[in-house]
Each structure stands twice: as structure tokens, then as C-alpha cells.
């Protein structure tokens, strides 16, 4: 090799002299100057070995051929080695030097490739380069695998401790080829170094040679294949299954709820820990080759990213059943909160498709949320008005809708965002979410109005409306729903409940109160006793019937029930007390008043206090 180096050096000296010397005399002077600096540049060697114009080409081919022979001997030894080259730092350094020299020679002589002898030598050099790349690719793969094998494998990303001992035992019994997964932490602000710094440096040196030799795609393929396997195993350890959109749609809802919880955990770990860690590793291995780094990173993360996005998309285009709202909101919020990570981690040109797809699916989830509210509207419209609720109590649709809306409004800010992104136009004083909630309330009230017509007794229909109206106001007033709908809405609906109250009293008790009024002039003094006796008899009968019926009716709200009783007592007791007082003072009839007075004032009050307790069925 030293002999070959000297020949190359002499050839270079001759080339310089020939290039700079404008005539034979100047060339000789230049050669003379060289000979004074180094004995190897003696005039004898330079003049004796200097080729003529005719044989210059053949001499160049000889130099190139000797250089290739030397490199072939070195590279072949490494290619044929049974042990990994990188197990010995000296061997790995020598192998890289040989590859560097081979690549440089190929580059230096490439401009003469049109000359047949040199072209043949360059073709041989390309074959040697390819063989060297095959071996260095194996070394690259081996380093990737060794790096991951040294990483801790006995930890899981999740915090569940179930079967932990069994799983640890299972890990210990597995062979060395097991793909490891990084140790979990609840703090997402961290980067995992999956490979040691020494391994990363070795990989970087190999990467430089493979890219310089034109084998960048092969290098990227090996790298991405190894890291992709690591990522996929990590996602599996997080509990995320590989599910198609059809698989997701076929799952039972309870099973799907659990899968969504696992997806949320996996998405956060992937976007905040795994993918940034892979980005950092990729940038270090492919340092100085940004395009190759971007392509390799995309290939590493694409499969896992698509797995995450496909699941979110399956949720977005799935059933719009109202009970799915809250889990769909969870997925929407997760995608929203991770948009910054999607933007930063997938910022290069190769990942643009993944980034855009994430935004599209996030918006599609918003459409799904709005679609679920439309389905809730349809559910209210379709709810039949067939069977009456016993005792005029709370209708199931009222309970369902109001509890549903209260729960939904715990995510008010998210819902505001979802509806603001629709194409609707908010009113001057209301957000689109307020408009949506007001519309649902209006549909519910209209539905209840229709249902109230099922009752044959108008008084009971008012009790029904009173119960449901009071429940609605309470649910609105005590939560975020009240913030949305506002105080004016609450005041108006409180007034509605009071109107139902008054309508109930008029329909049930007005006629009875009328019986307690006596027109002295119309009855005349002689007929007054008879009239009052008849009125008292009618009152007793009606009061008995009303109390019997209304005691089976239900007013679920204790305060409302007390308000009704107080109101009825104020209406009945003074009028009834005055009536029986006058009746008792009517001469002979008054002396026998006890024969006609069935209820004392205290009895009336006691019976009123027994109203609206309801039957067992009505109270449910």
C-alpha cells in the first residue's frame, strides 16, 4: 500500500509540472524544485517514470487499478468477517477509511468514465462499493438492534399494576430479541434516549458513508424498519389494538368506551414522548442530512400515527347516538390539545400529509359532536305522547334531557369551540351554543305540552307541566346551563311555573270556592239557610273527591309542594271559616249545624297537607 501511495504521489507531481509548465523548460524547472523538497521527487524517478503523451492514459489506468486492488483486498477481508466489524473500534475505523477512499477514488475518476479502460475500473469500483454497502447495512442493522436490546424492558407506559409480577416474569423469560419499550412517566415533558450516545455516533458515521455512496434510501429503510418495530411494540404495550374502522364500528359501546380511554393515553404518550424522542434520535443519526432525516422520521412514525388517526376517524364517522357525546368530546379534546404536538413534531414536508390529516379528523370530530346534538333533537321530537306519567310526575324525557345537557355543559368551553367552528351565525347577544341549547329547551317544552294533553283532567295536566317546568328551571339554574341561557331565561320560566300553579288552582278549586260565596240578596233571608245547606253539601262532596284524587298526584319538589299547600290553605281556610261561621249563626239551622258540617277548619287544613304525596308508582 505504501508503494502504491508513492506511485500516486509521483503521478500527481508530474501532473502539476505538466499543467503549470508552458513549455518543456518550465516543466523541467518545476520538477527540479520538487526534487529539492523530498527525496521521492528525485529527478531520476520523475524523469524515468514520467509517461509520454501516448502512454499517459494507460499509466493512469494502472494507477487506478492498483488502488482498487489494494482497497478490494481490505474491503473483502471485512466483508468476509464472521464477527461484527463494530465489535472492534480499530476494525470499524479501518473499514470506514477504506470506504471513504473507495468513494473518493470513484468521484475523482468519474469525469474520465467515458474512456473505456477507466470506465471498466469504475464499474468494478461500483461493484466493490455495493458489496461494502451490503455489509455496512448489516452492521447498521446490528447496531440498531443492539441499542434497543440494552434498553430497559420491564416497565410499562401505563400505571396499571394488575398482573405486574406475572408480566415481569414473562419479560425475564423472553429471549434477547424482545423489542423493549421505554419506561413510563406521568410527566409528558421528557425525551427518551432509546440508544446510547456511542451507538448513535457509530450509526451517524455509517449513515454518512451510505449517503455519500448513494445508498441513502437503503440506510433510511433499515433505520425506519427497526425504529418502527420499536414504536409499534410500544403502542401495543399501551394497550392500543390495531383496529380497522369497521372493527371499531362493530364494537359494543362499553367495550369501545374502554378502548377510547386506552387511545387517549396512547395518543398523549405517542405525541408528547415517543414521537419527539424519535425525532431527536433521527436528527442525531442523520445529522447534516436533513432531507434523509425527515424521510426516515416519517417512515418510522407513519404507521403508528395512522393507527391513532384511523381510530379517531372511526369515532368521528360512527354512530351519532346521544349517549356517545361525552366520549366523542374526550377524543375531540385530545386531538385539540395535541394539535401543537402534531404541528411541531410533523413540521417537515414529508409529514405534511399526516399533519393535514390530523387537522381534518379533528374538524370531523367537531362535526360529529354537532351531529349528536341534532340526533338529540330528533330523539325529543320522536318521543311518543302515549302513556301518561302517573300522578302528573316527572317525565323520563325531561330527566334524561336535562341531566344530559347539564353533563354536556361541563365541557362548555369545548362545546363553544365546536359550535363556533360551524357555519352558523350567532345572534347579537348569544353564542351559537346558547342558540343550540335554547332550541333544545324549546323542543323539550313543546314536547311536554303535547304530553300534557294526554291527561283527561286539566288540573292534572297543569300539575304535570308544573313538575316538569320546575325540574327544568332547577337544572338550568344550578349549573353551567344557567350561565349559557341567562337570568332572563330563568325568570321567564319561573313565571311559567307560577302560571301553571295558578291554572291548577283555577281548574280544581275555583268552583269549590264559588260554593262558599253566598249572595244574601239573591237568596233572601228566608231561603238563605236552605241555600247554604245545599252549598255545604256540594262542597263536602267536591272537597272529598278532589282530596281523594289529588292526594294520589305527586309534586316531586318539596318546596313547590309546600308552596301549593300554603296557597290552597290561604284560598280555602278563610272562605270556609267564614262560610261555616255564618251557617252556624242561622237560627234553627245553625243550632243543628253540626249535622251538615262534615269538616272543621282544622280538618280542611289537614286534608290539604295530605295532597300531592302521590302513590308509590307516581313517586318513582
Image (cartoon, helix red, strand yellow):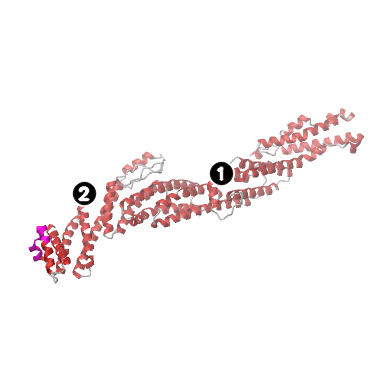
Q: Position of residue 434 (x, y in %)?
A: 60, 48
Q: Position of residue 358 (x, y in %)?
A: 45, 54
Q: Nearer the viewer, mark 1 or mark 2?
A: 2
> Looking at this rendering, what residue extends furthest in the top direction?
591
Does the CB distance between marks 1 and 2 fall below 8 Å?
Answer: no
What is the crowding at mark 1: few (fewer than 14 residues within 10 Å), some, or many (at least 20)? some
Q: Is residue 525 left or right of residue 196?
A: right
Residue identifier under label 1: 407
Majority secondary structure of magenta residues: helix
> Looking at this rendering, what residue extends furthest in the left direction?
44
| Residue at left offset 27%, top offset 58% | 212
Instruction: For mark 1, give the secondary structure.
Output: helix
Note whether residue 525 is visible: yes
Q: Quadrant of the N terminus?
A: bottom left
Q: Is residue 202 left or right of residue 9?
A: right
Q: Quadrant of the C terminus?
A: top right
Residue identifier under label 2: 89
Q: Position of residue 362 (x, y in %)?
A: 48, 52
Instruction: For mark 2, give the secondary structure.
Output: helix
Magenta-highlighted residues: 33-48
Nearer the observer, 525 or 455 = 525
Amino acid at each position: 500500500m505504501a508503494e502504491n501511495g508513492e506511485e500516486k504521489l509521483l503521478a500527481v507531481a508530474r501532473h502539476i509540472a505538466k499543467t503549470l509548465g508552458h513549455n518543456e523548460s518550465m516543466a523541467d524547472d518545476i520538477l527540479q524544485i520538487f526534487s529539492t523538497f523530498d527525496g521521492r521527487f528525485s529527478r531520476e524517478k520523475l524523469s524515468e517514470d514520467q509517461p509520454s503523451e501516448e502512454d499517459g492514459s494507460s499509466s493512469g489506468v494502472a494507477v487506478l487499478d492498483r488502488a482498487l486492488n489494494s482497497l478490494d483486498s481490505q474491503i473483502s477481508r471485512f466483508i468476509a468477517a464472521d464477527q461484527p466489524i463494530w465489535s472492534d473500534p480499530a476494525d470499524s475505523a479501518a473499514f470506514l477509511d477504506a470506504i471513504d477512499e473507495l468513494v473518493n477514488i470513484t468521484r475523482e475518476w468519474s469525469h474520465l468514465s467515458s474512456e473505456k479502460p477507466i470506465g471498466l475500473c469504475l464499474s468494478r469500483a461500483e461493484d466493490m462499493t455495493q458489496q461494502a454497502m451490503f455489509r455496512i447495512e448489516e452492521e447498521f442493522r446490528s447496531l440498531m438492534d443492539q441499542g434497543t436490546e440494552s434498553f430497559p424492558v420491564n416497565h410499562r407506559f401505563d400505571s396499571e399494576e394488575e398482573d405486574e409480577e406475572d408480566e415481569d416474569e414473562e419479560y425475564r423469560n423472553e429471549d434477547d430479541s424482545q423489542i423493549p419499550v421505554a419506561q413510563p412517566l406521568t410527566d409528558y415533558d421528557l425525551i427518551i434516549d432509546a440508544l446510547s450516545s456511542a451507538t448513535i455516533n457509530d450509526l451517524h458515521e455509517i449513515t454518512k458513508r451510505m449517503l455519500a455512496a448513494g445508498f441513502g434510501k437503503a440506510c433510511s429503510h433499515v433505520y425506519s424498519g427497526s425504529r418502527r418495530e420499536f414504536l409499534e411494540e410500544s403502542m401495543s404495550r399501551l394497550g392500543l389494538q390495531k383496529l380497522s374502522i369497521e372493527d371499531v364500528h362493530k364494537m359494543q359501546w362499553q367495550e369501545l368506551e374502554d378502548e377510547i380511554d386506552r387511545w387517549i393515553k396512547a395518543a398523549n404518550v405517542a405525541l408528547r414522548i415517543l414521537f419527539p424522542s424519535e425525532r431527536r434520535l433521527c436528527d442525531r443519526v442523520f445529522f447534516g442530512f436533513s432531507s434523509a432525516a425527515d424521510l426516515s422520521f416519517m417512515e418510522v412514525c407513519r404507521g403508528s400515527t395512522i393507527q391513532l388517526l384511523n381510530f379517531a376517524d372511526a369515532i368521528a364517522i360512527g354512530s351519532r347516538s346521544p349517549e356517545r357525546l361525552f366520549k366523542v368530546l374526550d377524543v375531540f379534546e385530545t386531538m385539540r390539545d395535541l394539535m401543537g404536538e402534531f404541528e411541531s413534531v410533523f413540521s417537515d414536508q414529508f409529514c405534511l400529509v399526516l399533519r393535514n390529516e390530523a387537522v381534518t379528523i379533528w374538524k370531523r370530530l367537531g362535526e360529529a359532536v354537532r351531529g349528536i346534538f341534532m340526533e338529540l333533537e330528533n330523539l325529543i321530537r320522536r318521543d311518543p305522547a302515549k302513556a301518561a306519567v302517573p300522578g302528573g310526575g316527572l317525565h323520563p324525557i325531561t330527566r334524561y334531557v336535562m341531566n344530559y345537557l347539564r353533563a354536556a355543559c361541563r365541557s362548555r368551553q369545548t362545546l363553544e369551540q365546536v359550535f363556533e367552528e360551524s357555519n352558523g351565525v350567532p345572534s347579537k347577544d348569544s353564542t351559537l351554543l346558547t342558540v343550540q341549547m335554547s332550541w333544545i329547551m324549546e323542543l323539550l317544552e313543546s314536547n311536554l305540552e303535547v304530553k300534557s294533553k294526554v291527561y283527561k283532567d286539566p288540573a292534572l295536566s297543569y300539575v304535570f307541566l308544573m313538575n316538569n317546568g320546575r325540574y327544568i328551571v332547577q337544572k338550568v339554574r344550578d349549573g353551567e346551563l344557567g350561565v349559557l341561557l341567562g337570568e332572563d331565561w330563568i325568570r321567564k320560566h319561573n313565571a311559567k311555573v307560577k302560571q301553571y300553579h295558578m291554572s291548577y288552582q283555577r281548574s280544581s278549586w275555583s268552583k269549590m270556592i264559588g260554593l262558599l260565596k253566598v249572595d244574601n240578596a239573591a237568596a233572601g233571608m228566608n231561603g238563605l239557610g236552605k241555600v247554604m245547606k245545599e252549598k255545604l253539601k256540594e262542597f263536602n262532596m267536591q272537597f272529598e273527591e278532589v282530596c281523594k284524587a289529588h292526594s294520589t298526584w305527586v309534586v316531586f319538589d318539596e318546596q313547590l309542594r309546600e308552596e301549593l299547600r300554603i296557597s290552597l290553605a290561604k284560598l280555602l281556610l278563610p272562605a270556609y271559616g267564614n262560610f261555616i261561621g255564618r251557617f252556624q249563626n242561622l237560627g234553627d239551622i245553625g243550632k243543628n249545624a253540626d249535622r251538615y258540617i262534615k269538616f272543621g277548619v282544622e280538618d280542611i287544613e289537614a286534608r290539604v297537607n295530605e295532597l300531592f304525596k302521590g302513590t308509590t308508582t307516581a313517586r318513582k
